[in-house]
Amino acid sequence: MSLWRLLPFALVLAVVPLLDSSYLTSVAIIIALHALPALGLSLVMGFAGQISLGHAAFYGLGAYGSALLALRLGLSPWLATPAAIAVTGLVAYGLGWSIFRLRGHHLALGTLGLGIVASIGFVELRGVTGGSIGLSAIPSYPLPGLDLAADQSFFFLAWIVAALAFLAAGNLVDSPAGLAIRGLGDSERGAASLGIGVARLKCRIFALSAMLAALGGALYAHYIGFISPQPFGVGFSIKLLVMVAIGGFRSIGGVLAGVAFATLVTEPLQDLGYYDVVVFGALLVVITIFCPAGLLQAVRDGARRGIRLLAPRAG
Amino acid sequence: MTMRLAVRDVSVRFQGLQALRGVGFELRQGELTALIGPNGAGKSTLINVISGELRPTAGAVLLDDREISGLPAHAISRIGVARTFQGLELFGSLSARDNVVAGSVQRAGLGFWRNLVRPPRGAATRRLEAAAQDALDLVGLGHRADDPAHILPAGEQRLLAIARVLATDGRWLILDEPGAGLNDVEKRALARVIRELRRRGWTILFVDHDMALVGDLAERLLVLDRGELIADGTADRVRAEPRVVSAYLGVKPRRSSMRAAAPIRPPALLEAQGLSIGYGGVQALDRVSMRVGAGELVAVIGANGAGKSTLLKALTGVVVPAAGTIHLDRAVLAGVRTAERVRRGLSLVPEGRELFGSLTVQENLMVGAYSRVPRWARSLPLGGLAATSDIARALERPYGLFPRLAERRHQLAGSLSGGEGQMLAIGRALMNQPLLLMLDEPSLGLAPQVIEEILDALLTLRRDGLALLLVEQNARTALEIADYAYVLETGRLVAEGRGAQLLEAGAIAEAYFGFDRRTDPAAAAGHLPQPAHDLQS
């Protein structure tokens, strides 16, 4: 029933290798890696109706956590990644209990602060994180017969993992429990009156969301092989927000479209360096004002209106 | 099996306000009970205490012998005491069916993490959806199952809220104003549903203002007034209770002799003709015409939901009427923005006062003069501005009318008592040097002596030649000081006349206090007016 959600993943997995373009492959990998934290953010913001402006922190925790477990403890990346995800989930669950005492603007500020604290932590905890230089020589995922450091093969890992994550998230939001989550987003009082433990549910969603981000971060670390604090700053949190906004907050499928759009549009802006955040900011403003239901929905509505305008002539 | 829900000596204090005072009663299983009382009596507070949204300052709520006060709302719902809300709190983005399914999620025990790997459309889901369909059929919304909740008309949304709470499996239902905003047909449907629930074994406590509905349904009535339980019994017993009558209608007016009625009404300052306004299928105002003459004190009375607020919104330009015209000082107001209407002398003292709590009394007053201060002077320091002759003179009026405000001019508005806050709200509106001062429920939630003070101030203003429009639920209070009054009932003008005449006619009290089924639609209102507090106490 919800397997149709896998269609775009199947298409990408089938078509991109055929095109045999190293540029496209690397862009596709970035899309898959960013889609994981964006999916997590969509669960928190779109479905549960909360705000998080610090989601890059969990992306970073996943990346640093998995890299450090592999580097310092010599764990296999296959074990380091789930361990880092679990730790991030626990951290987020614990943080959730305190941060979700806040609401609205206060929650936005609280999570923003969280993101800033984390990004400063990545820089300043030099003994652990390597400071602004970061960590290098992070091992890639070992697999007999396949070199997962190479784009061509990592592409499959990234997209299969992303497909499974989207499938799982889709299962959750379509389940009756997902109705509780969406209900919470519409009316907290209403949800509580139905026996739904609102505080705990928020923490669980937050933890799940953080774990998805950590998964993306860990994959990134073992794929790139070195990490520095820069990609895990507040700028990335804002980028995630834009991606989810483009997709229209409450749409699992929209997240992938939003990430793809944002990545494809801004990939050429890499030369601008930090200034790409300016573009993201402008995009965010435009989308919030003109297409609050997401760019995708706006395009769909526009197309429908166009068809309606043309239809009488055709008939 | 639980048999009793006991409220024991429950008191609730908000800063400075005693919302509930030693309220105690017991509900036995299977009872159908109504909780009534004027606005501000503490009904919502009491429901919030029982449902766990609010912790009582003193006292306890017990289910059988287990104390449930202090538990969080969701825990109380799980124990089986479930509620609906006056504001519904539906999940607007979900379909009607999904709203009900969401109500059953907790008891279905589906967990959280498991759902990541379980196909979402499995047997468990189908079972919940079938149960949801039954609940929707029970309230008569079976055909609406797939429609998003937010597009349903108001009446169906009320019924949906009931269907949703049924899904929780709670056996004790607390329905907060299930009939608010419903038309007669919808109310009959609601009454049918409530009776059916009673027959199927639910214990129900419901709040409503519609006395016809309450008298028709409830076996037992609890009456709250100003935080106290003043009556408990059958409809007939409660109706005969003198304290109940005076809570709703007040005591004999004292001021009716104060004003000799002018033989002819003065020329119109404000005139509305044929105003009609509808919100989402509900006709909030239906061809209402009224006017306020120069120097007149005119009252608009009517119960909750009669259309009084909507009338004010139309006059102030917050909503655009679907039909009808409004003239102020002979100029048409159509298309004139709210700010411009204020500048032309239409001042509103809003319901709930809407003060700027972080500003001082004097600063609040100065903001009231905003439209009188020339544009270039608006960025000048307040202290300097207050010293200019115009503003200083304007400040004399509120300070003269309410000396207590002058004493507290440097106090923050947020720290004022309710009565002082109302004085400040009136004073702030006066700073606009209005042609017409409109007051929305100025007596709401105030103690009798304070109401008296406020009414005296209004009479002083009228004596000084100011035209006033007083919107009140508090029928007797308003009628006894008004030169002329209009009575609204579900959006229609049902009576008008000189205040004293309407008061003496007695028809209003009858119409407003009828427990019996409406027979004559023109006279029967079925709503209770809000309390006219005992002015002699």
Image (spheres, coloured by chain):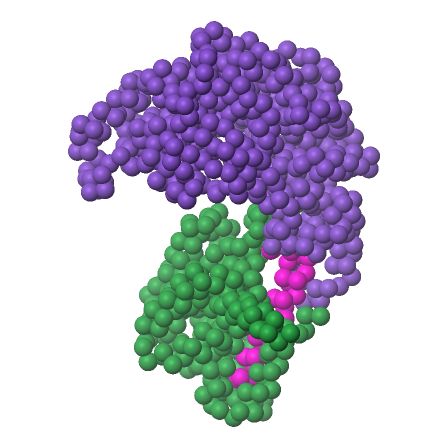
Chain colours: A green, B purple
Up the image or down, A45 lies above or below A9; here it is above
Depth check, front residue: B219 or B157: B157
Picture residue at 53% right of the left edge, 41% below the top: B323
Can residue B215 be seen here?
no
User: Residue B215's x, y, as percent?
Assistant: 72, 24
Asked if residue B138 can be seen in this view, the reply is yes
| Residue drawn at point x = 36 percent, y = 22 percent | B466
Q: Which residues are magenta?
A: A153-182
Image position, residue B213 (x, y; %): 71, 28
Check if residue A152 falls in the magenta segment: no
User: In the image shown, does A12 or B464 lie closer to the viewer?
Assistant: B464
- Residue B15, image x and y in percent? 45, 27
Q: Quadrant of residue B46?
A: top right
* B432 on left or right of B305: left
Check if residue A173 falls in the magenta segment: yes
What quarter of the picture does the N terminus of chain A occupy?
A: bottom right
Q: Quadrant of the C terminus of chain A?
A: bottom right
